[in-house]
Image (cartoon, rainbow, N blue to C red):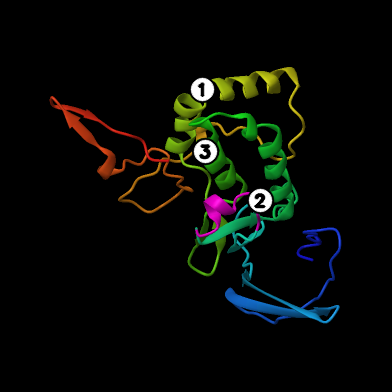
């Protein structure tokens, strides 16, 4: 239970509570061992215990950083380091985001064709589970999507799909997605390679130098997925 929220990853489970007196943010590893019908089962998870310090803001978003241990975005986030879990009042985060992402996959993205499908998968996963940023004083926050990635999906990879979703939203035909909404690309920060990072970069517009071809002084670039 975290801030009054109990995460229920599956139907049948046993709740074990570990109490830790912490004064600063740190990583912890929990190991579990169980025996069922003479068969031993073991599992291990590493997570970040966040110590939330008061910040001089009107509305402070509560959350924590940890490894992504879900399934639906494992292909894109499994080795990406720490992600941000929002557990504020307006966004319970964690398993709710996993559940909503799974529904969107099943109802929408599974019907998309390439190159839209892969680009939409990456953007959705980063929206649901942003990159984690550790600031001075052990403050933790999640980065929003990057402007370039959002624009690439809206105007390059998924033009028709984006328009269709927008029209359905206007007509009220889309099913409720809690706090999941189409991002407004113009409101997102720009990704700048040589400057301090301020957004969750999906790299949809990164150029793979090995895939650049030259012909009659004409350079053709292939956008890397």
Q: Residue at x 80, y 59 (%)?
A: 8
Question: Depth check: 69 or 181 in front?
Answer: 69
> Furthest-left residue in view?
216
Residue matched to label 3:
118
- Queried whether the magenta region covers residue 15, the answer comes back as no
Disc 3 crowd rating (10 Å Cα; few below 14, some 14-19, many 20+) is: some
Residue matched to label 1:
159
Q: Is mark 3 on a helix, strand or loop?
A: helix
Magenta extent: 70-79
Q: Which residue is drawn at 49% across and 38% down?
A: 188
Disc 1 crowd rating (10 Å Cα; few below 14, some 14-19, many 20+) is: some
Q: Which residue is drawn at 69% across and 20% down?
A: 168
Rounded to the nearest angstrom, the CA distance separating label 3 from label 2 is 35 Å
Q: Please identify the dominant SS of the magenta region.
A: loop
Rounded to the nearest angstrom, the CA distance separating label 2 from label 1 is 35 Å
Residue 216: percent from left, percent from top: 13, 24
Residue 99: percent from left, percent from top: 73, 47
Numbered-mark total: 3
- Queried whether the magenta region covers residue 74, the answer comes back as yes
The mark that comes first in sequence, 2 or 1, is 2
Label at residue 59: 2
Q: What element carries label 2?
A: loop
Q: What element carries label 1?
A: helix
| Quadrant in which residue 47 is drawn | bottom right
Rounded to the nearest angstrom, the CA distance separating label 3 from label 1 is 14 Å
| Closer to viewer: mark 2 or mark 1 | 1
Question: Depth check: 143 or 128 in front?
Answer: 128
Contact, mark 3 vs mark 2 (Cβ under 8 Å)? no
| Quadrant in which residue 212 is drawn | top left
Q: Is residue 118 left or right of residue 13?
A: left
């Amino acid at each position: 239970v975290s801030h009054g929220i109990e995460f229920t990853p599956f139907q049948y489970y046993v709740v074990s509570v570990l109490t830790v007196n912490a004064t600063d943010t740190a990583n912890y590893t929990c190991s579990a061992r169980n025996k069922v019908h003479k068969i031993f089962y073991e599992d291990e998870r590493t997570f970040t215990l966040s110590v939330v310090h008061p910040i001089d803001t009107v509305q402070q978003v509560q959350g924590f950083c940890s490894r992504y241990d879900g399934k639906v975005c494992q292909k894109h986030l499994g080795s990406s380091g720490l992600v941000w879990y929002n557990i504020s009042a307006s966004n319970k985060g964690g398993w709710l985001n996993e559940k909503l992402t799974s529904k969107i996959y099943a109802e929408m993205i599974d019907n998309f064709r390439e190159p839209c499908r892969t680009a939409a998968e990456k953007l959705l996963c980063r929206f649901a589970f942003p990159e984690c940023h550790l600031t001075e004083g052990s403050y933790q926050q999640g980065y929003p999507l990057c402007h370039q990635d959002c624009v690439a999906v809206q105007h390059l990879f998924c033009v028709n799909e984006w328009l269709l979703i927008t029209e359905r939203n206007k007509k009220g035909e889309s099913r409720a997605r809690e706090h999941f909404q189409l991002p407004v690309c113009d409101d997102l920060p720009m990704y700048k390679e040589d400057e301090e990072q301020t957004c969750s970069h999906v790299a949809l517009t990164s150029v793979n130098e090995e895939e650049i071809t030259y012909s009659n002084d004409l350079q053709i670039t292939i956008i890397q997925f």
